[in-house]
Amino acid sequence: MKLLSNKSFNAGLKDSISFGLAFIFLYVPIGALGASQGLSLSEVMATSIFIFSTPLQFMLIQSYGAGISLIPIILALNSRFILMSSALSGYFKNISYKNIFLSSILIVPSVFSACISRFKNKEENYFLYFLGVGLPIYFVSVLSTFIGYYTGSGITSPLFYEIVKIVLPLQFTALAAKHWPDYLDISAYWIGLLFAPLFIFLFKEYTMIIAPFLIGISLALIEYIGKKK
């Protein structure tokens, strides 16, 4: 109850609403896909409980028979979490390693973006805000996976899958809006959109891994040079 009375935690809960709704449409299909692939409920639920990374979960469920050959791809996909964790670490200096370790599952792009955009402009209890944003999204995702597993075979409406297709663009729009009016951060989104055809031509199937790093490093250098001037 003490946690629920904290302003920072409540602010995180409020900001998690828009992202949590999007995660329903991302994680119901994960559960449905697992059921269609013949995986057990525990196997599918384990991906959401212990991995909690949408693209990686889709890949593991679709290619679960590939075994250790997936390790290089898993490492490449998860390398982004090193960058996100490093960026957040400066705000969690007074938090015990145990609490950071237990909550590290919550570090996903949506939670990271919500935190960074707020932390830059507001002094507060950073860790409690992080929990306020991350916990509802995590529990909604786990529950949606469970629902998707048992209702997947009954989800036949084309409308549902059309909704799923537009969820990610809407989610990224919401993420971009969180960074307003920080033009440099917002530019990462439209740069990715404009240069997507070029990235796909150059990097093919590795676009999802290489492009974010190129954009992020470029913007970080621009910001660093700007501050030095």
Image: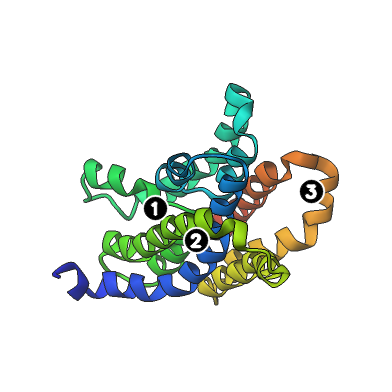
Give the residue at mark 2.
110
Judge by depth and name the residue closer to the eye, 72 or 48: 48
- Pointer 2: residues within 10 angstroms few (<14), some, or many (20+)? many
Residue 229 visible, this orientation: no
x and y percentages locating residue 152 in the rendered image = 58, 57
The answer to whether 7 appears left or right of 142 in the picture is left
Which of marks 3 and 2 precedes in the sequence? 2
x and y percentages locating residue 127 in the rendered image = 28, 59
Asked if labels 3 and 2 touch by Cβ distance under 8 angstroms, the answer is no
Mark 1–mark 3 distance (CA, rounded to whole Å): 29 Å
Judge by depth and name the residue closer to the eye, 17 or 58: 58
Mark drawn on residue 26: none
Judge by depth and name the residue closer to the eye, 224 or 140: 140
Q: Is residue 204 above or below residue 158?
A: above
Query: Helix or strand or loop: what does disc 1 sit on?
Result: helix
- What amino acid type should be assigned to the residue bearing mark 1? Leu
- Pointer 3: residues within 10 angstroms few (<14), some, or many (20+)? some
Mark drawn on residue 199: 3
Query: Helix or strand or loop: what does disc 2 sit on?
Result: helix
Residue ranking furthest to the front: 154
Judge by depth and name the residue closer to the eye, 77 or 176: 77
Give the residue at mark 1.
106
Q: Residue at x 51, y 48 (%)?
A: 53
- What amino acid type should be assigned to the residue bearing mark 2? Ser
x and y percentages locating residue 212 in the rendered image = 64, 49
Q: Is residue 38 above or below residue 31?
A: above
Q: Residue at x 51, y 73 (%)?
A: 178
| Tag in front: 1 or 3 | 1
Residue ranking furthest to the top: 68
